[in-house]
Image (tube, rainbow, N blue to C red):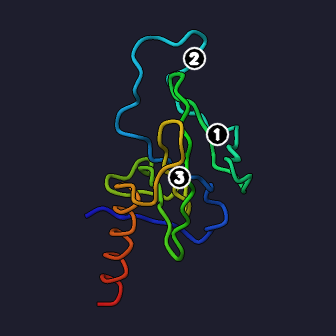
Amino acid sequence: MSVYTIGDNKDQIEKSTVNILPTAVNFTGTVPNGTSNWESYKEVDKGRDGGDGNPVNYLRGRKLVGVTHTVDNYQAVLFEKENGKEDSYNAVSASSDIVTYEHQVPASVQNDQVERVEEWVGIARFINTI
């Protein structure tokens, strides 16, 4: 049986953001001076209405525009295997924000990825009430 530990020092756990990318990035070939690694967004797309803006990132030269979703009272936690222990894991990062991306435009609320997150939260709430 594996042991997953968040520990007493929750404030020391690195804050992160879950990024959900489109399943197919519509691009083939190489990108001069590009990188194949994901880098955190450095731009904000204000859109036509000039609102708060959506995170913008580029993957292999393709513009991806995201929408941030905050899941109240829940966190996604990343665990790392503890050195020297067979089935023991420690929390290294936590996130309460999920960013879903689409090509060129903000992701729709009816997006399948968003629906899956909402379904997961509903299941978690049900399990925790039993």
Which comes sooner in the sequence, label 2 or label 3? 2
Q: Residue furthest bottom?
A: 130
Disc 1 and disc 2 in contact, CB within 8 angstroms: no
The label number, if any, that marks residue 113 in the structure image: none
* Crowdedness near tag 2: few (<14), some (14–19) or many (≥20) residues, C-alpha within 10 Å: few
C-alpha separation, residue under disc 1 versus residue under disc 3: 11 Å
Q: Residue at x 34, y 61 (%)?
A: 116
Judging depth in this view, the residue of 56 and 98 nearest the camera is 56
Q: Residue furthest left?
A: 1
Residue 54, compared with residue 97, is above or below; it is above
Q: Residue at x 45, y 47 (%)?
A: 20
In the rendered view of the protein, which quadrant contains the N terminus? Answer: bottom left
Which comes sooner in the sequence, label 1 or label 3? 1
Residue indicated by mark 1: 41
SS for callout 2: loop
What percent of the width, then of the height, locates residue 78?
47, 54
Kind of residue indicated by mark 3? Val
C-alpha separation, residue under disc 2 versus residue under disc 3: 22 Å
Q: Quadrant of residue 130?
A: bottom left
Residue indicated by mark 2: 34
122 horizontally vs 74: left or right: left
Residue indicated by mark 3: 99
Residue 122, compared with residue 40, is above or below; it is below
SS for callout 1: loop
What percent of the width, then of the height, locates residue 92?
54, 54
Judging depth in this view, the residue of 95 and 52 nearest the camera is 52
Q: Residue at x 56, y 42 (%)?
A: 65
What percent of the width, then of the height, locates residue 10?
61, 68
